[in-house]
Image: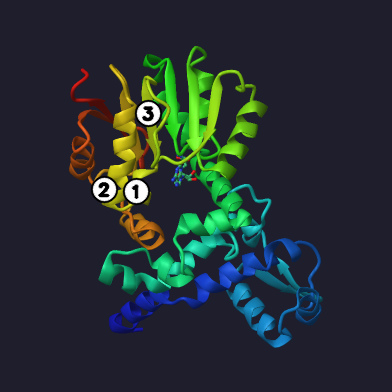
């Protein structure tokens, strides 16, 4: 093969949509789970799942080329490699790829990337006719799968967030948009005298409350169902925004920071955990944030500038993991 042909093939492999979509549809249909065991004939599987026998066989063939499935004397079965796509594999992949779950559905908005690049707006709105958060609010399955995805993505990082920063300085911490509360729970467990307050939208807040109670933290944590565009609980020692600002364009990010600055009192801090542009943020994620939300992974100077508009003075940046940093701010008028 000439270098010219090799380059062409490499680019086509990078850019081709057939394989990513085959994997996503396979997971959506639950094929890696269903085909664990003895081989199943394509026709039987098609009847069972209500799919076109001919078309399903084509999909099974490509999944076999990819090594996800293998042929047996009786049909197709999942390989050891393909088992990593099973719902019970424990790696969160199935949840991310399923096109009916929040992650997979969001990824399909990439077909609107050209629109996002032209306008700076979320491709998600163009594809689904509503923004990401409205879609989640209207569809409990999306809400639940997104929240689970958020917990899963931090599983290995949370212990390093807890040890990588001195949280013991704070007696009270408000986790603004705290999701199911896995980070807040870990911080509270490591700092037994601290009290926490999590704020998130109603359905997520209810699940967070149950999860925190289950972990024995019910008496040290308060959960409020509410919006971070409305006033936040006032007077806490610290306000945490973990992976919040990158979900929003500048106008909305300003409104969130304004609420934190307004609630923060003497000596309190605003803590921002983000993937910072140029400091570990992946360029690919810039595009994900753009397409999903019209957001981006901001650089340090951009985050400082955003915060400064609300009298929040930058104190320090701490590298927590390869991908996340923590920025600390205090109110300008209150040292
Ligand atoms: C990317 S997730 C981050 C969750 C959590 N802070 C973490 O780092 O795992 C963004 C969170 O913001 C919450 N959120 C979105 N809009 C909100 C609003 N208007 N008010 C409060 N929370 C909101 C979502 O429900 C979600 O839990």
Number of on-image labels: 3
Q: Is mark 1 within 8 Å of ligand 1?
A: yes
In percent of width and height, residue 291 lies at: 38, 63
Foreground of the two, 222 or 61: 222
Label 3 sits on a secondary structure element that is: strand
Q: Residue 246 carries which label?
A: 1
Residue located beneath label 3 in the image: 239
When the figure is inspected, residue 274 is found, relative to residue 122, above or below; the finding is above
The C terminus is located in which quarter?
top left
Horizontal arrangement in the rendering, residue 108 relative to residue 114 (left or right)? right
Residue 298 is tagged as 2
Question: For mark 2, does the 10 Å Cα neighbourhood hold few (<14), some (14 to 19), or many (20 or more) residues?
Answer: many
Residues at marks 1 and 3, CA–CA distance in whole angstroms? 16 Å
Q: What element carries label 2?
A: loop
Q: Which residue is drawn at 54% across and 51% down?
A: 146
Question: Which mark's residue is nearer the viewer, 1 or 3?
Answer: 3
In the picture, which quadrant includes the N terminus? Answer: bottom left
The percent position of residue 238, horizontal first and vertical second, equals 37, 24
């Amino acid at each position: 093969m000439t270098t010219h042909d090799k380059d062409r093939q490499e680019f086509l492999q990078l850019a081709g949509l057939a394989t990513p979509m085959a994997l996503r549809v396979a997971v959506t249909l639950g094929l890696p789970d269903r085909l664990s065991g003895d081989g199943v004939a394509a026709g039987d599987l098609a009847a069972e799942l209500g799919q076109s026998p001919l078309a399903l066989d084509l999909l099974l063939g490509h999944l076999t080329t990819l090594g996800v499935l293998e042929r047996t004397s009786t049909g197709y079965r999942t390989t050891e490699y393909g088992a990593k796509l099973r719902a019970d594999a424990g790696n969160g992949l199935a949840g991310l790829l399923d096109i009916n779950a929040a992650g997979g559905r969001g990824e399909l908005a990439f077909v609107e990337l050209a629109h996002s690049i032209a306008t700076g707006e979320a491709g998600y709105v163009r594809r689904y006719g509503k923004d990401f958060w409205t879609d989640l609010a209207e569809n409990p399955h999306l809400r639940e799968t997104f929240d689970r995805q958020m917990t899963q993505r931090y599983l290995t990082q949370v212990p390093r967030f807890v040890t990588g920063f001195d949280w013991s300085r704070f007696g009270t911490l408000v986790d603004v948009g705290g999701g199911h509360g896995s980070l807040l729970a870990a911080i509270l467990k490591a700092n037994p005298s601290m009290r926490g307050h999590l704020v998130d939208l109603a359905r997520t807040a209810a699940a967070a409350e149950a999860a925190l109670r289950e972990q024995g933290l019910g008496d040290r944590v308060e959960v409020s169902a509410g919006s971070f565009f409305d006033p936040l609980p006032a007077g806490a020692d610290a306000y945490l925004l973990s992976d919040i600002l990158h979900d929003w364009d500048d106008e909305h990010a300003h409104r969130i920071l304004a609420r934190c600055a307004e609630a923060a009192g003497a000596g309190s801090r605003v803590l921002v955990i983000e993937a910072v542009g140029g400091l570990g943020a992946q360029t690919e994620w810039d595009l994900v944030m753009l397409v999903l939300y019209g957001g981006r992974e901001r650089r340090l100077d951009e985050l400082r500038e955003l915060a400064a508009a609300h009298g929040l003075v930058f104190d320090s940046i701490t590298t927590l993991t390869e991908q996340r940093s923590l920025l600390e701010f205090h109110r300008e008028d209150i040292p």
